[in-house]
Image (spheres, rainbow, N blue to C red):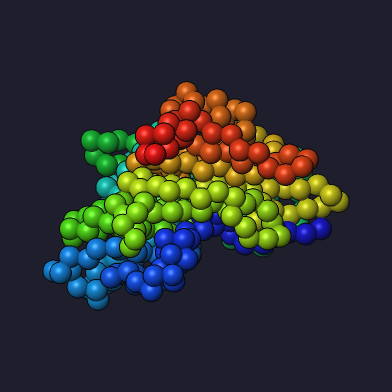
Amino acid sequence: MKRGVGLGLLLVFLLAGCEMQSRSNQPYPFQYSNGTMGTSFTIKVSQLPEAVGDASLKQQIDALLALINGQMSTYLPDSELSRFNNSQSTEWRGVSPSLFEVLAKAKQVHEQSHGAFDVTVGPLVNLWGFGPDPMNFVAPPAEQIAEKLQVIGSEHLSLNESENSVRKDIAALYIDLSGLAKGYAVDRVALLLEERGIRHYMVEIGGEIRLKGQNIQGEPWRIAIEKPTADSRMIQKVLPISDIAMATSGDYRNFFEVDGVRFSHTIDPRNGRPITHKLASVTVLSETSMVADAWATALMVLGPTQGLQLAEQQHIPALFIIKTDVGFIEKSSSAFSDFFKVKS
């Protein structure tokens, strides 16, 4: 038996940030890397207004990320989300506007993806050994899967927009926002930068990314998508993009194998089992990182055929990298192809 390594941070932001900068020796006027939400983040600003202080901006970013983590973390026992998860009440409960916004988007993508995206799938992820519980390297029996399926489903979560309140009709319902929270944090940091008059930036948290304006060279940001191989780190494709958010989901760095059978960390919430199709990774472009984050997960669950069909129906710019016997092939939605036609 073996397990894949790494956490699947599939976006490798290169070239503009590293290769080009090393050739020009021109540093970014603001560049900040640190940790948050159990992962790392990097922010680069090409043009920093004189009135914006370096130290002050870092403090504001850290405070914002700490606030969001305190609202949406499942690892902090006193976070707003943890308190909701741990409550046995099925009564309405008021929540912060931020948490309500993320839950509302989760419900929307759940419905639009016909259940492929589901923030209540956490108990199944844990059952298969990909959550905080120890990895057992053993596929769970069918009766345990069936038992967990009884306590998941976003249809059991109700939202009242007029009162910013939510309720669950199953006391054991458990919500994990890892498929949106990092993207939401990216969007909030981007908004913070724009409120400070910053118009050229890159914000990346745990592989979710948002870009605006130009890089330090005065050109579009150049973002590399990793080749979906477990045993090496290589570039599959470089995208020159700006004024857009981007997220990638894949199954090639977090898995285990037992007797030659591979079990992916991507769990299909509709049947409670790891995906088995040939889609290695999918990259989604969107106006917000939160939406890109959620749809990358949903399309990864759906696979190359159903995922591409839904991307076409929903007009989602998506790039699919598919495993074959001789390597990888790429397929893209019409909206993805059209985005680069417009930008070229």
Q: Is residue 317 left or right of residue 70?
A: right
The location of residue 141, given as percent across then percent down, is 76, 44
**Location of the N terminus (image quadrant):** bottom right
Q: How many tags in the picture?
A: 0
Q: Report the residue that reaches farthest toward the top.
A: 313
> What residue is rendered at 69% in x and 36% in y?
277
Q: Residue at x 24, y 74 (%)?
A: 54
Q: Is residue 330 above or below residue 191?
A: above
Q: Please tell me which residue is depicted at 32% across the width and 46% down the height of the picture.
A: 243
Up-down relation of residue 196 to residue 32 (above or below): above
| Residue toward you, 339 or 134 | 339
Seen as rendered, the residue at the extreme bottom is 55
Q: x, y percentage for residue 237?
A: 55, 48
Q: Is residue 212 left or right of residue 40?
A: left
Q: Nearer the viewer, residue 307 or 166?
A: 307
Res. 79 in view: no
Residue 45 at least partly seen: yes
Image location (x, y in percent) of residue 135: 69, 60
**Residue sticking out furthest to the left:** 51
Q: Which residue is at the far front? A: 24
Q: Nearer the viewer, residue 228 or 134?
A: 228
Look at 68% across and 48% down and name the residue there.
264
Q: Quadrant of the C terminus?
A: top left
Q: Position of residue 215 (x, y in %)?
A: 34, 58
Name the quadrant containing residue 330. top right
